[in-house]
Each structure stands twice: as structure tokens, then as C-alpha cells.
Image (tube, grey):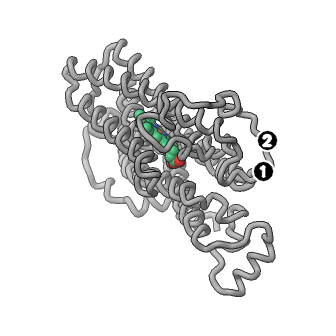
Amino acid sequence: MIERIKILINWPAFSLAWPAQQSSNTGFSDTKEQIAVRRIKILSFCSGVMGFIVVALGAWTRLADAGLGCPDWPGCYGFVTIPISPEEIDIANTKFPDTPYEVAKAIPEVVHRYFAAVLGFMITCMAFMSLRHKGIPSDIKKLSIFLFIWVILQGTFGYWTVSLKLWPQVVTTHLMSGFLTTGLLWLLYFKAKDRIENRKTWNFSHATKNLFNVALLLVAIQIFLGAWTSTNYASYSCVDFPLCQGQVIPESNFKEGFNFFQSIGPNYLGGQLDHESRVAIHITHRFGALVVTAFLMFLSYHLFIRKYRIMALGLMAFLGLQVLLGISNVIFALPLLIAVGHNLGGLLLITYLGVLRLREQ
Ligand code: HEM
């Protein structure tokens, strides 16, 4: 039995056996460790792609108002997949009389959960490989183990998202924590890649590193504001652009909009805040976008004149795309594809900045 579990946990090591045949030019000597780092590189690449898929599925679930598509966790109305036959649907409705079963809402929720579970498994495999090989570089080992712990926390937030009926604090944390998981997976990939290729990074000056730090902080705050807009259902509170209800700052209630102690208990699907509080949240996200845009343009200029031209152009492209998607969200009244695209745009932006800043020691 134990042997079987070992084989299962070590599955990527068997299925990705091909790196063992490659030769490389790494800075560390033990071949077993080289092979393990190559496997981690492949697996972190696949997990990074998977991270984007899981985040997109999470956004789809939230935006389709399907966050409570399954009122229990980890099952769905007590089923491993979803109730399908009329008998199963009857059982589901008897078990949860307060939340009648809707197949269109159960599907996104279950698909999101299954993909998240696969991602969790991939992260577990990487942590296991890092622990098994003593000579794995410490940054790669630490990152793999941190990701393992983090993904367990992420799953717990997934559970609370359902059990606390979409309490905005938890849904926002769940979204941001998914961004962190995906960003760190890409960082792990690039760190493993740099080890294998023995690649030197950019050698940024102190000032450049500090600018990256500020950019990361501002984008993280902006992502929080976006998630807070979404989880409090404040997207429709300003339907015009660039003004909001024809004014720069219409009547708004910032105190209630940013009250992080909303009570636990009510069902937060559709939001519980009044109109003025939602307006406050929405316009703060818009003003945040102005600050972020100005700062990232400055950072791009800073990078461009220091000969990091492609890096600077990449940053401008991701920023431009994100702002366009944000404005389209408002103008076209939140079409699902654009809203999911805006979510992924935020993830792309912070992952890009994070990898540029942290790939270098
Ligand atoms: C500059 C960088 C920006 C970043 C990093 C950013 C990030 C985000 C994120 C992460 C979300 C949460 C999406 C979700 O829950 O699925 C969001 C939501 C939103 N953003 Fe932005 N955003 C930016 C700019 C803008 C701009 C310029 C606008 C419009 C003027 C805008 C309008 C919105 C709206 C309406 C939502 C709520 C959508 C929903 O309910 O899902 N954003 N933003």
C-alpha cells in the first residue's frame, strides 16, 4: 500500500523521466539533483499554466454568480461530481432545501474545484521532490515547500468561501491568494530554469529594485480593490466612463464601503451593501487605476532608458491591455469574457512584475 502511495505521489517523476537523459551546465554537482530540478522546472511550468486556468475558472464561477452552486464542500450536494438524474436532483434538493439545485451553477463550481485539486496535487509532487533531494538549491526548495503550505491554505479559503456564504473578506482573500500561488509558481519555474541554464539575471540597481517593490505593492493594492469591487457586487454602481453617474465623485459612503467587519451570516450573493457604499468601492478602484498607470509608466520609462527595452515594452503592453479591459468592463456592462480577461490581466501584470523583481536574488 505504502509503495502504491509513493508511486502515486511520485507520478511526475516517472512520467517526466526524459530529463534524466539530458546533459546540462548547472552550478551544482549531483546528477540526481539536476534531474529533480529539471522535473520541477517542467512541473512548475505546467502548474503555472494550470494556475491561470484555475484563476480563470474561479472568476467564471464568481461572475456567473455560481459561488454557491454547491452549498457543501468538498462534495456537491453530497455527490462526488454533480447530481444528474432526476432521483439525484431530488436527493440534493431534500438535503439542502434552502439552496435549490441549479445545474448551470453547479457546473462552474465543480469544474473549478476539480482543476484546483489537480493543481494542488502537482504542487504536492514538487514539494515532495524538493524534500527528497537534499542537494536541491535552497531557494527552489523553500519556494516549493511554501507553495505546498500555501495551497492548503488556499483550499481552506475555498471551503470558507462556501461555508461563510461568499463573505467578501474571504472571497477577496481567496482570489488574492490564488494570484500569489500562480505568481510564485512562475517564479519557481524561472528560478529552476536559471539554475539549469546557469543564467545570470539582470543585475538591477538598488533604485530599480525599489521601484519594482513599490510597483508590486501598488498593483497588489489595485488587485485588492478590484476583488473588493467584484465581491461586493459594485461593478454596476458606475455605468458611465470616465465619469461615474455624470460626476467625478458622486455621493458615496467610504466608511461602509471599506468596513472590513461586515457580519458573518447573511448570504452575500449579490452583495449586502447600499448603493453609496458600492459607489465608494467602485470609484476607489478607478482612482487606484490612475495611480497604478502613472507609476507603471514611470517604471517603464526608467527601464527603457536603462536599456531594458523589451522589459519596459512588455510592461506597457500588459498595463495597456489591463486598462482597456477594465474600461470595457464598464462600457459593455461586464460581459463574462471581458470580466474574466480583466481578472487574468491583473494576474499577468503582478506575475510579470513579481518574476522580474524576484528572479534576481
Ligand atoms: C490598472 C490596473 C488594473 C488592475 C490591476 C485591475 C485589477 C482588477 C481585478 C484583479 C479585479 C477583480 C476581477 C474579478 O473579481 O474577477 C478587477 C475588477 C474590476 N475592475 Fe479593474 N483593474 C485595473 C484597472 C481598471 C480600470 C481602469 C477599470 C475601469 C475604469 C476597472 C474596472 C473594474 C471593474 C468594473 C471591476 C469589477 C468586475 C467584476 O465585478 O468582476 N479596472 N480589477
CA distance separating discs 1 and 2: 8 Å
Residue 122 appearing in the image: no
Residue 210 drawn above or below residue 256: above
Q: Say which quadrant the C terminus sits in.
A: top left
Check disc 2 and give the amino acid type: Ser
The residue sitting at 49% across, 44% down in the picture is 239
Check disc 1 and give the amino acid type: Pro
Residue 48 x/y as whole percent: 42, 49
- Tell whether label 2 touches label 1 (CB within 8 Å): yes
- The residue that mark 1 highlights is 266
Residue 205 x/y as whole percent: 32, 14
Q: Secondary structure at mark 2?
A: loop
Left or right relative to 198: residue 235? right
**Viewer-proximal residue among 269 and 295:** 269
Left or right relative to 134: residue 264? right
**Viewer-proximal residue among 10 and 328:** 328
Q: Say which quadrant the N terminus sits in.
A: bottom right
Look at the numbered disc 2 and say if its residue's Cβ is closer than 8 Å to ligand 1. Answer: no
**Viewer-proximal residue among 6 and 307:** 307
Left or right relative to 196: residue 139? right
Q: Secondary structure at mark 1?
A: loop
Label 1 crowd bin: few (<14), some (14–19), many (20+), radius 10 Å: few
Q: Which mark is residue 161?
A: none
Residue 201 x/y as whole percent: 29, 27
Left or right relative to 263: residue 82? left
The residue sitting at 59% across, 42% down in the picture is 150
The residue sitting at 38% across, 18% down in the picture is 211
Residue 162 x/y as whole percent: 70, 55
- The residue that mark 2 highlights is 263
Residue 141 appearing in the image: yes
The residue sitting at 55% across, 59% down in the picture is 61
